[in-house]
Image (cartoon, rainbow, N blue to C red):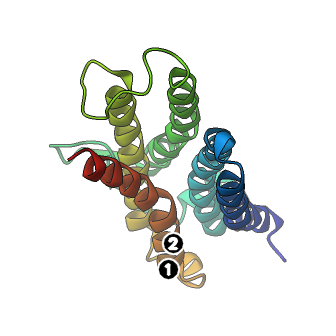
Amino acid sequence: MAQPDAQRKVLAILWMVPIYALCSWFAIVWPGAAGEFLLVSSVYEAYTVHMFFALLVAILSDSRGEDAALSELPAQLRAPFALFSKTQVRSSRFLRDCKLGTLQFVVCKPLLSVLDYALSYTALGGGELVDYRRPELWITILLNISVSVALTALLKFFHASHTSPKLMAHRPWPKFLSIKGVVFMTWFQGVLITLALRF
């Protein structure tokens, strides 16, 4: 209650459960509109990923902004998206890169979900997932890249900040696993089920 900024982010994350439940229930009751309900849950799913990142920053900063959170991070960190190098960056750039990594998912997931939904009503849609001539495969690949970038950003930020006493007091590891499990594993589960049906 003493940190209203963090409290708003917790509430935004908790809303994911009833939104998922209602969208799933409506999709069962009205199967003809299942695509529309899945779009709603997809958009909120992307928003939740960024809200979790914003919650970690709010806890680290005591709701005083991103600049205050920087004092809880080491001065030099390995760049979050440096694949084959050990490039060191300042904590401010590290925080910015991790934030952009989660925000790109907030943009890509809804756009690609709407594109996939719109294509399902055209001659281009309705193809098999493994057909490289159909847009479903390329949308799936782009979504997979977006999910992977967002997960990497969350992992890198969590790894850099998990030893902070402020964060440790809130036991972030189970919360991190919950967000990772609900959001990311459901995505990979959908891809695996589609591939299993195909083969």
Q: Mark 2 or 1, which is nearer the eye?
A: 2
Residue at left offset 40%, top offset 30%: 139
Disc 2 to disc 1: CB gap under 8 Å: yes
Percent x, y for residue 187?
43, 52
Q: Residues within 10 Å of mark 2 (few under 14, many from 20)?
A: few
Three-letter residue code for mark 1:
Pro
Residue 186, placed above or below residue 191? below
Left/right placement of residue 118 relative to residue 19 reads left
Residue at left offset 83%, top offset 76%: 2
* Label 2: element kind: helix
Q: Nearer the viewer, residue 123 or 176?
A: 123
Left/right placement of residue 56 relative to residue 123 reads right
The residue singled out by tag 2 in the image is: 178
Percent x, y for residue 156?
37, 58
Q: Which mark is residue 15?
A: none
Q: Nearer the viewer, residue 86 or 145?
A: 145
Q: Residues within 10 Å of mark 1 (few under 14, many from 20)?
A: few
Q: Quadrant of residue 157?
A: bottom left
Percent x, y for residue 32?
66, 40
Q: Which mark is residue 174?
A: 1
Three-letter residue code for mark 2:
Ser
Residue at left offset 45%, top offset 67%: 181
Q: CA distance from mark 2 to mark 1?
A: 6 Å
Residue 86, placed above or below residue 174? above
